[in-house]
Image (spheres, rainbow, N blue to C red):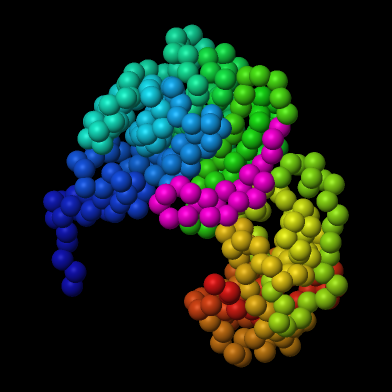
Amino acid sequence: MKSKKSFAQILQGMETEQNRRIRRKLPAWQGHDIVVPTALALEQCSSSVTASYKASLVVSRFGGRLRSVCDITGGLGSDCAAFAAVSDKVWYFEKNPRLADAARHNCSLLGLENIEFRCGEVGPDTLLPECDLIYADPARRDSSGHKLFMLEDCSPDIAGLYPFLLERAPVLMVKLSPMADLSMVAGRFGSSLREVHIVCHGGEVKELLCVLEAEEGRFRGIRVAVLSGDSGEVSAGFSFLPEEEQAAPLLLADCLHASQVLLEPSAGMLKSGAFKLVCTRFGLRKLAPSTHLYVLQGESLPPEGLFRRYAVEEVLPMDSGSIAAVRSRGLHAGVSARNIRMDSEELRKRTGCIPGGDMHLFGCMTSCQGNVLVVSRRIL
């Protein structure tokens, strides 16, 4: 019979879990007497690796150290800490007094003396200091904790505020939800939008970064940045202009067979919408117009951070006989359904695949062979 945990034990377990999250998300903060007012504050703050990427991005953009940065949604202070390392002065604004006090405490422990803290909500009437860069990470939850998806529903309403902000700084960087729609973003920010960065880490899209400018100019493209380790350095990158994707030819595979290399786009590549251009850039052929899987035509593999790689071991027609044959093997394999009339979970149940191992079963529609089952092995 299990013994009930005391209240003190429950609190200790919660504290231990919080420490684990801090170590995982903010490793440089581990070991300090860090104050985290709420679990939501830790969940919503940028990780050290994505904050470092933002800092390196602005240094590259300005050609060196910045004079000043203004973070109008300071939160727990992780982005401010990264900007403080590459700027002479950082202004921190935060409307939540508890968060502002925690950030002031945390940044002091980290020895960051070039941050000036101000508690208050930024709006059109706020007297912001003139600076090189303004950074904003609008809150994507309402007062009840429900997630918000429309840009104008977030706080502050950056869609309405950005013209005012661009009067105070030549460059505005906005962090958005990984779920934000790129066409919606382009429509909201119009001609001020210069770049969109799809920031990936650990196999997931972590952030969408939008770079806006006050001066007239052209859109410079979408960049998928795959970050490695805890440094914020880019291990794999891919940049393109939307018109390049529109003009790219659709190159389809004329066959699918054992010994080929199958490539599955990462979450960041899928988010980018570059489905045709990758064929000419990397020497690939698409299995079908709406099947986002590719086979390698040349000998050079594209960066693994952009695609997961699989060695095709067997290609079977998707019929009851093949499904029964796969089921009889008791495969330890991941399962993915692509562009067929069932989802991945249903395909897994029908084929009896057991999660685990380095095998992967794809059920997909192809232009050359119809619906097929592809038995493959992950290439690491």
Residue at 79%, 65% in the rendered image: 285
Query: Is 235 included in the stretch rendered in magenta?
Result: yes
Residue 141 within the magenta-colored segment of the rendering: no
The foreground one among 3 and 48 is 48
**Image vertical order of residue 87 relative to residue 229, above or below:** above
Left or right: 107 with respect to 130?
left
For residue 300, which quarter of the picture?
Answer: bottom right
Image coordinates for residue 34, horizontal then vertical, percent: 23, 40
**Residue at (75, 70) in percent of width and height:** 298
Residue visible at 80% across and 41% down in the picture: 243
Name the quadrant containing residue 250: bottom right
254 left or right of 61?
Answer: right
Q: Residue at x 70, y 20 (%)?
A: 216
Quarter of the image holding residue 152? top right
**379 shown above or below 49:** below
Q: Residue 310: x, y in percent?
A: 63, 73
Q: Main secondary structure of the magenta part?
A: strand
Q: Residue furthest front?
A: 63
Start and end of the magenta stretch?
A: 219-239
**Front residue of 188 and 9:** 188
From the top left corner, tell me how far across and down residue 31 is, in percent: 21, 47
Residue 12 sits above or below residue 152 on the image: below
